Image: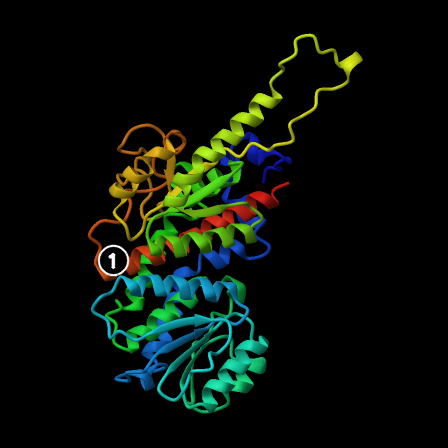
Amino acid sequence: MPDYPVGATLDSGGAEILDDPEALRARDTSGALLGAASGGAQIRAVATAVESGALRSLEGFRPRALSWVAGRSSQSAAAAGLVSALLERYEDGPGIPFSVSHELPAWVGALDVVVVSGADAGDPVAARAVASARARGAAVVVDVPREGPVAEAGGEGEAVCWFPPLPFVAPDRAFVRHAAAGLAVFGALGWAVPPLAVLADRVDEAIASNGPDLAVAVNPAKLAAREIAAAGFPLLVHEDAVSGALARRMVAAFAEAGTQLTEMPLADALRVAPLLRARAARAADAETPDDIFHDEFIDGPRKASGAPSLVPTFLGLAVAAPRERVEQLAAALESVSWVDFGDTPGDDGSGENPSGGTPESQAREGYSLGGSGLGSSLDFGELLEGALVTAACAEIAAAYAALLNLMD
């Protein structure tokens, strides 16, 4: 295995390191890549629990409201945001009010469903939520490892519905499972959610197209990780609510990987982009020598302006909104690399992008970091599939970014 020196990631754009599957696997000591690659398995575990009757008590039940309690789990809160954004696109659902909160709301009662989701079985907030919801007579679904204080609060018997986690996946890498659990609950309550096993198969196919054995040139997740890691100020823009929920999770996932990423609605990005360019131009002018008679031996070193250059590298995410319309709106940003994990560049297996040029050059010029995009005229099932594929592959991209930061 080659010994990559410090700085190899930036000098080579990360291509050499990311193209070495053995190096990636050897340095995945934290299980980041393994956990990210289990997205389909996480969905399938939820599907298996549902098929085993985990949510049988909810069938035919029409609750007054559903309350999602995330406790201190940021991933659970992000998954709830994604589920909420997806359900907003479904106009034919039963119309059950849906709230997301840190603790159990005071209004929850016997006519409600409570989903307690998280990774920490010792979370006192989650334990209190389970115990209080049971005491009030609510239907309780728990997506937390069944151990510790949470298990004690849930008690024995069938009073609480449980979603068991995968034993080989770290609890803090279960964002996709949280989202699948929420979709399963809403499916039991009457939403036309596609079979989770089918969604799991589709996610597995996408993960295989972003795996460590595939080269950067034909691997959208590696392309995205390299682009974000190399950018001084990567800014992920989005237009629709589903993309916004996914973008916020991507920011958190890359932060956990030690890589800076910022997200912003497209309308805000269009407003602030001129301000950022003007600031960068002022910083560049201040560093330009404007006194030809300045002598550093007599007058001392030139004073730097101290203002950092904030020229953003724009990336775009369009899942529920038509890509063409969002691209037109984003044209004023001059160059946007569109993140799309659905298909690898060059469906014919040649490794060439049919739109011409290499994937690397297209990313720089504002083309896609993946396939043809989601967006226009998606039905609800297609939207769910696209959102879960994007969520799972974004976790893989963040895992690649974490391994880039660990290279030495």
Furthest toward the right, the residue is: 298
Q: Residue at x 39, y 66 (%)?
A: 179
Q: Secondary structure at mark 1?
A: helix
Tell me where residue 183 appears, x and y as whole percent: 34, 69
Q: Is residue 357 left or right of residue 156?
A: left
Q: In this rendering, is residue 162 above or below 249? A: below
Residue 120, how many percent across, how many down?
A: 56, 72
Task: Decide which of 118, 358 is in the foreground and name it.
Answer: 118
On the image, which quarter does residue 176 sit in?
Answer: bottom left
The colouring scheme, among rainbow, by chain, secondary structure or one colour, is rainbow
Residue 254 lies, in percent from the top left, at 52, 50
Quadrant containing the C terminus in the rendered view: top right
Q: Residue furthest top?
A: 293
Q: Is residue 82 above or below residue 153?
A: above
**Residue visible at 27% across and 44% down?**
323
Query: Is residue 27 something one can see in this rendering?
Result: yes
Residue 174 visible here: no
Picture layout, residue 73 above or below residue 112: above
Q: Quadrant of residue 113?
A: bottom left
**Residue displayed at 51% across by 54% down:** 252
